[in-house]
Image (cartoon, coloured by chain):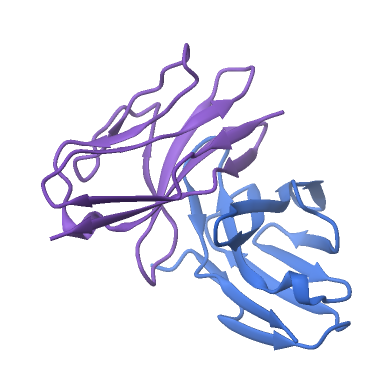
Chain colours: A purple, B blue
Amino acid sequence: AQRVTQPEKLLSVFKGAPVELKCNYSYSGSPELFWYVQYSRQRLQLLLRHISRESIKGFTADLNKGETSFHLKKPFAQEEDSAMYYCALSFSDKLIFGTGTRLQVFP
Amino acid sequence: DVKVTQSSRYLVKRTGEKVFLECVQDMDHENMFWYRQDPGLGLRLIYFSYDVKMKEKGDIPEGYSVSREKKERFSLILESASTNQTSMYLCASSLSYVEAFFGQGTRLTVV
């Protein structure tokens, strides 16, 4: 069955430290993967998608088909990165999400 | 600028009531989704629709139904509300395999 796994519920780092939010997926076809972010009191919004291969707000994510992973990385965390991050998989018009990781960046 | 609108931010309903949550999008998207968002459980797909009058069950459809009579509107119906349906409900719309846009959410409390 298709599934998205985010093993960490909470990740706490200090400002300036590197960040890696883990995401693993289960899908037999060619995956379409996304990272969505929800800042406090705001709507869920797209952060980045693997096919565009862009860097948004300093975040990048590389699809590793061998390890079925799509980890989100940022070399230097900022306080404004504190938010809830969701990894998502799109297939057959469906869009499913992982359980999310709350990132806390301390000053 | 608002693209996906949910009819209510907060709702309080009694156990056993029939509840309607409405969602409207103005982007002419084929796909629309209803999720519930619970702490520690993430977003769980209840139902989605890929065209007018077309719907498919998601991962947790029990106790819910949906209606899509027009392309821009997707309604979630709780046939007989129960306390375990107290949650945040999110609506979204998208074109296939591209960005999904979310509504602001409806926090439903069933008492």
Q: Which residue is painted at 86% across and 84% down in the image? A: B17
Residue A98 occupies quadrant: top right
Q: Horizontal placement of A80 versus A48: left or right?
A: left
**In front: B55, or B72?**
B55
Q: Is residue B22 above or below residue B60?
A: below
**In front: A39, or B73?**
A39
Task: Give x and y (percent) for residue A11.
Answer: 34, 49
Q: Horizontal placement of B24 versus A49: left or right?
A: right
Residue B73 occupies quadrant: bottom right
Q: Is residue A64 above or below residue A35?
A: above
Q: Horizontal placement of B37 versus B101: left or right?
A: right
Q: Is residue B88 above or below residue A90?
A: below
Task: Give x and y (percent) for residue A92.
Answer: 67, 31
Q: Which residue is painted at 80% across and 47% down in the image? A: B57
Task: Give x and y (percent) for residue B104.
Answer: 50, 70
Residue A59 occupies quadrant: top left
Task: Give x and y (percent) for residue A97.
Answer: 56, 44
- Residue B76 seen in the figure: yes
Q: Which residue is painted at 55% across and 56% down in the image? A: B40
Q: Which residue is painted at 64% across and 68% down in the image? A: B23
- Residue B6 seen in the figure: no
Q: Is residue B28 above or below residue B107?
A: above
